[in-house]
Amino acid sequence: MKIRSQQKKQQGVALVVSLIILISLTMLGMTSIQRTTTDLSMAGNQRETGLMFQSAEVGLVAAENLIEASNTNGDFDDTNGLFTVVANDVNYKTPAYFNATTWGASVSQASGAAGASMTSDFGLKIEPRFIVEYLGDRAQNALANVNIGGYGTQQTGEIVSIYRSTARGTGLTGNSFRYVQSYYGKEAP
């Protein structure tokens, strides 16, 4: 009779051990799910960041193509995101790059200019946009006195028109933005 009572006690211990193992496996599974969710979120953010940067780069390329295609600096008439910065003009205000209204419908879109539509080809909600500021010829405006050639080398004596391009790219969600700015020099014909 004593043997039977010990077997009943052992069956209860087995149930407790089974529950402890089940709880630890459940905790391990929940930790794995949480880690996977975090990894997916990080990968999505990284993809969003990459798309924003690539979109902004497309905007810069479109701005450079527009500059190269322009035959005159008269195109920069403070409309469609094309501005002229007059030397010593105290009334000129650089566009508020981080203000959403600056990037409205009147600013140049990169679609068509770069040969592809970012919204249809890549699923972006907003096309990349760019603003180009004509800073003048290198010798005319202190803002235009930047070294566009090789870094640390002597500037050539040629007339070079200097432009500051700012592009704004968005990701898939359209809620985050990347801004890229560059200077571009174009020799006078």
Image: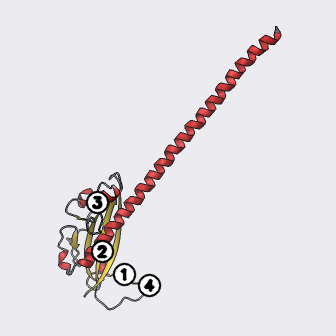
From the top left corner, tell me how far across and down residue 174 is, in percent. 32, 53
The amino acid pointed to by label 2 is Glu
Q: Are circles 4 and 2 on residues that touch, CB within 8 Å?
A: no
The residue singled out by tag 1 in the image is: 148
Task: Point out the frontmost of discs 3 and 4.
Answer: 3
Mark-to-mark CA distance, 1 and 4? 10 Å
From the top left corner, tell me how far across and down residue 15 is, in percent. 68, 21
Mark-to-mark CA distance, 3 and 4? 37 Å
Question: In the rendered image, which quarter contains the C terminus?
Answer: bottom left
The residue most toward the right is 2
The amino acid pointed to by label 3 is Glu
Mark-to-mark CA distance, 1 and 3? 28 Å
Looking at the image, tell me whether mark 2 or mark 1 is earlier in sequence order. 2
Tell me the element at label 2: helix
Mark-to-mark CA distance, 2 and 3? 17 Å
Image: 95 above or below 154 = above
The amino acid pointed to by label 1 is Ile
Question: In the rendered image, which quarter contains the N terminus?
Answer: top right
Mark-to-mark CA distance, 2 and 1? 14 Å
The residue singled out by tag 3 in the image is: 127
